Image (cartoon, rainbow, N blue to C red):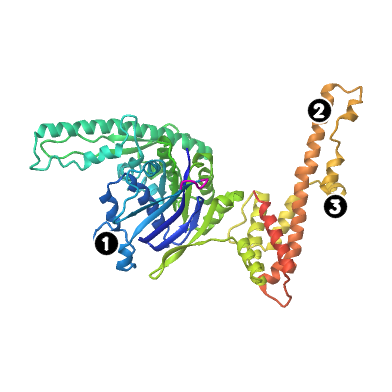
Amino acid sequence: MSILRIQRIEAKAFKAFKHLDFKLDGRNLLAYGANGSGKSSLYWLLYTFLQSGQKQTDEVTKYFDPNRDERLLNVHSDSTDKNQAHITVTLDTEDHTASTRYTISAYQHDTHNVPEIVKGNLASDFVTYRILFNFYRFRNSEAIDLWPVFESEMLPFCYTTSERDLDGLWKSIRYDNSFTPGVPGPAKKRYDAFDVRATRFNMALTQVLESISTEALKFYRQNFSDDDLQEVKFGMVLRSPVSMYDRKQHRFDWPTIGFEVQLGGQKLDRPHTFLNEAKLTQLSLSVRFGATLAHLQDANTKLLVLDDLLISLDMGNRMKVVDIILSETFADHQKIILTHDLGFFNEFRRRIAGHHIGWSFQHFKNPSAQTGSTLIEAKSEIQKAEDYLHGQNLDEAATCLRKAADDSAKRLREWLSKEKLPPGKFFTLTENLREAKNRLLLTIPKQLYEKVLKGTPIDLLQKLVPNSAADIEKEADLEPAERGKINSKRGSLRKLLTDTHWKAMENVRLIDDVLASTERVLNPGAHGGETPLYESEVVIALDLIKRLENCLP
């Protein structure tokens, strides 16, 4: 099956966008911006686009019609642009052999019943903090009812073997107008038909909730349960089903869905009053992703779109979720990660590490009445330094390198000491580098470093320990088991010299080089001065800071 990925996103007069033309080129997207900058507009753009595949044309075109209450038009666009409002998404295979543009507007519905779009909608996942918050936003006196959030956020993607369109079945119940006065035909037949649909829906909904709960618990145990002092169990249950039609009151009752949690085998009557927000977020996130895993689809297009998902978690728990997002679980999804937290953006970017080529890093520029929201490339300090260096602006290049060095040195020190630096306490670049160097030297015996490793090239170190067993084969008094043990120990010693200790020593040398560069390039570049900077020195400093960054896991 050929994987289809988003190559280009275009929009006119849609929500925060006046004229958007963004080339994603099949990559994943990590983007940050302040609240109101356009993140949620991109979220809803993609959501609206994928949902349009299985909607009737009027349900889609109403979003672009200036005369409809449901319109999602940019308020600052003029009437001409509003009349031309549209969303256009270009999908293409990874080998760029099947590019197709799809447009939805007030006059166009290219996605209607297109298999790639319909299946892609079912296979994709859209999650915001608001969705998770709705799992536990209830008052202390209230019992949790997840039906409203389930109906809007999960039901459209659920199905069973007997009910392939569970959302459609529910809508045929919810919007049934056959009881309207004046509708022709026997009333009993209409009532009975309703009750049949309600029974079918209740049976299918029960199966769906059971399958989601099973996957959610499995997901939670795999990703969040390590720190639990007591075993946690949880799941969604159909507390009350869709009622049969009340033929006297001319009404029916909607379903309610409970959220049951057990802690150490004891049921929590109101988990939202007992558990903290971080744990509730973990549980609700497990349910949300459990819904995806319970209804995995074979589809050409799969998106994972997250909008400020983790704002209630501390950075440690956020990074657990980042690792999940980057794991094999979502390997087939094109990921769109949106956040207002620059610190989280930077940590996520670091976690991607050597896989940057598959990602686009962007910054939402706050919208204006003239331009609307726009996306601009979010460059790292090292990338900025490279740009300044190419433009012969050496002072600015050095300033960016100083910022990059400060950040890398702090994180290297924390990694080697296995603890975070005290919040609010400032340490200089030199202090962090020297402490990191001292930590590295602790891993190497001093005499070994001074008399063997220091100044010895790696190719000579490899010759210090024989790689051959010829010499011990001549020792007639050694048993075969003893010879094998000596060979094994030699291998360990060789690895220790040429791998563990060698890498530590190289990193010590690197830190010394950065310290020297700090005196000559980074400090004058950061703080000004009369000493001129030279391009060759800045180039060397750039290489050193890149290597320092690569020391980190």
Q: For this view, does 162 lie left or right of residue 513? A: left
- Write down the region rendered in magenta: 94-98
Residue at 80%, 35% in the rendered image: 491
Q: Which residue is mark 3?
A: 455
- The residue type indicated by label 1 comes to Pro
Principal secondary structure, stretch drawn in magenta = loop
**N-terminal label among 2 and 3:** 3
Where in the figure is residue 132, as x and y percent of width and height?
Answer: 39, 47
Q: Which residue is mark 2?
A: 485
Numbered disc 1: secondary structure = loop
Nearer-the-camera pick, 404 or 304: 304
Give the class, few, some or many, for how many residues have Cα within 10 Å of label 2's Cα (few <14, many ≥20): few
Question: Disc 1 to disc 2, how far (Cα)?
Answer: 81 Å
**N-terminal label among 1 and 2:** 1
- The residue type indicated by label 2 comes to Lys
Q: For this view, does 506 lie left or right of residue 11? A: right
State which quadrant residue 397 falls in: bottom right
Question: Disc 1 to disc 3, how far (Cα)?
Answer: 74 Å
Residue depth check, mark 1 versus mark 2: number of the one nearer the observer:
1
Numbered disc 3: secondary structure = loop
- The residue type indicated by label 3 comes to Gly
Residue 475 — which label? none
Label 1 with label 3: CB-CB less than 8 Å: no
Q: Residue reaching furthest bottom?
A: 530
Residue 66 — which label? 1
